[in-house]
Image (spheres, helix red, strand yellow):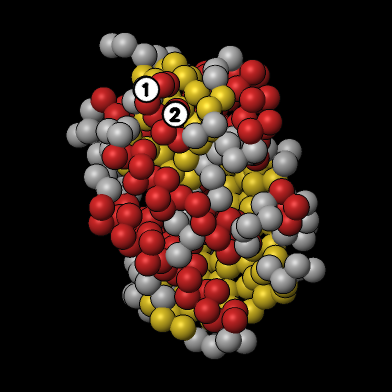
């Protein structure tokens, strides 16, 4: 089989991680990069030995990729994704699928699941996969909690994003994946940053089966992720991670960098497999990705209305 030709659009922090991971995969050839910051695109292209393009049309027609990873800010994804798929390329879209539920629903309806995939890396991370298996064995009704904190530098590194769409979205997806249920109602309270964006949010979710989940996400602390459900609890920090089972036994993992590096590698390898074998099963579909964005919309609506209860997905 000939090498799969991959281009990356958006070469900030996430895009560079995609390039680094693709570079390590067998049968993948990097063929180009594109970024709104041309100087950054050229520097990253030089680092990975590929041309930097000044337009999407130029990248698609001259680099001739089989597939494109899209890691631009969510507000710029909709038309860009449709242009990529219009050229016959498969597309991997960094989460979330779009910046708002209406755009996400439109894309989910228009895109072919066999040629498009949304990146939700937790579904490929061993600690989360084990937590899900434990929770599914126990069954509902669910009473879950999760927290995801990141340093305050996210405010500067992601000037067009908020903590719900960039950080809490991971847990919104994971909740649906773990429980197999919809979020029916949400209530949220939060703190705004100096520029008016939501930077710390606490949310209470009511699930379709009657269970509940409490989520926290904040750009106000050290890197640490936690999740607890069905008597099991997971903690992932910089240097180590541990999953405690309902019986109290604990399994240790490496720290966040290793856990998420391995998960991203598995995710991108899965995407490449699907390009050549559309029948390869996937653990989620575009409708599920759009559902997470609709829940994020409901949370933002609740925040803007002072914590009123809002219908979820």
In terms of secondary structure, where does tag 1 sit?
A: loop
Q: Is residue 91 visible?
A: yes
Residue at image coords 42%, 18%: 28
Looking at the rendered structure, which numbered label has been put on residue 58? 2
Looking at the rendered structure, which numbered label has been put on residue 296? none
Residue at image coords 71%, 48%: 157
N-terminal of the pair, mark 2 or mark 1, is 2
In terms of secondary structure, where does tag 2 sit?
A: helix
Where in the figure is residue 293, as x and y percent of width and height? 44, 63
Where in the figure is residue 30, as x and y percent of width and height? 48, 19
Q: Name the foreground residue: 81 vs 219.
A: 81
Label 2 and label 1: CA atoms lie apart by 9 Å
Quarter of the image holding residue 103?
Answer: bottom left
Q: Residues within 10 Å of mark 1 (few under 14, many from 20)?
A: some
Q: Is residue 248 visible?
A: no
Looking at the rendered structure, which numbered label has been put on residue 64? 1
């Amino acid at each position: 089989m000939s090498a799969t030709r991959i281009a990356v659009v958006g070469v900030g922090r996430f895009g560079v991680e995609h390039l680094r991971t693709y570079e390590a995969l067998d049968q993948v050839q990097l063929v180009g990069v594109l970024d709104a910051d041309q100087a950054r695109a050229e520097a990253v292209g030089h680092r990975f030995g590929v041309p930097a393009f000044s337009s999407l049309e130029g990248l698609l027609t001259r680099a001739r990729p089989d597939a494109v990873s899209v890691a631009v800010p969510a507000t710029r994804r909709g038309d860009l994704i449709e242009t990529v798929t219009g050229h016959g390329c498969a597309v991997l879209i960094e989460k979330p699928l779009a910046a708002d539920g209406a755009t996400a629903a439109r894309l989910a309806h228009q895109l072919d699941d066999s040629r498009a995939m949304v990146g939700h890396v937790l579904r490929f991370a061993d600690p989360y996969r084990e937590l899900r298996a434990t929770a599914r064995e126990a069954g509902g009704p669910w009473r879950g909690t999760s927290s995801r904190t990141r340093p305050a530098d996210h405010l500067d590194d992601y000037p067009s994003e908020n903590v719900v769409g960039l950080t809490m979205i991971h847990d919104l997806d994971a909740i649906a994946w773990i429980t197999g249920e919809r979020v029916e109602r949400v209530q949220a309270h939060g703190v705004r940053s100096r520029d008016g964006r939501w930077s710390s949010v606490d949310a209470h979710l009511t699930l379709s089966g009657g269970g509940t989940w409490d989520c926290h996400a904040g750009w106000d602390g050290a890197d640490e992720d936690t999740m607890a459900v069905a008597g099991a609890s997971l903690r992932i920090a910089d240097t180590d991670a541990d999953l405690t089972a309902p019986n109290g036994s604990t399994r240790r993992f490496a720290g966040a960098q290793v856990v998420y590096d391995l998960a991203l590698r598995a995710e991108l390898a899965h995407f490449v497999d699907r390009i050549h074998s559309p029948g390869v099963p996937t653990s989620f579909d575009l409708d599920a990705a759009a559902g997470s964005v609709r829940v994020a919309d409901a949370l933002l609506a609740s925040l803007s209305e002072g914590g009123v209860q809002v219908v979820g997905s």
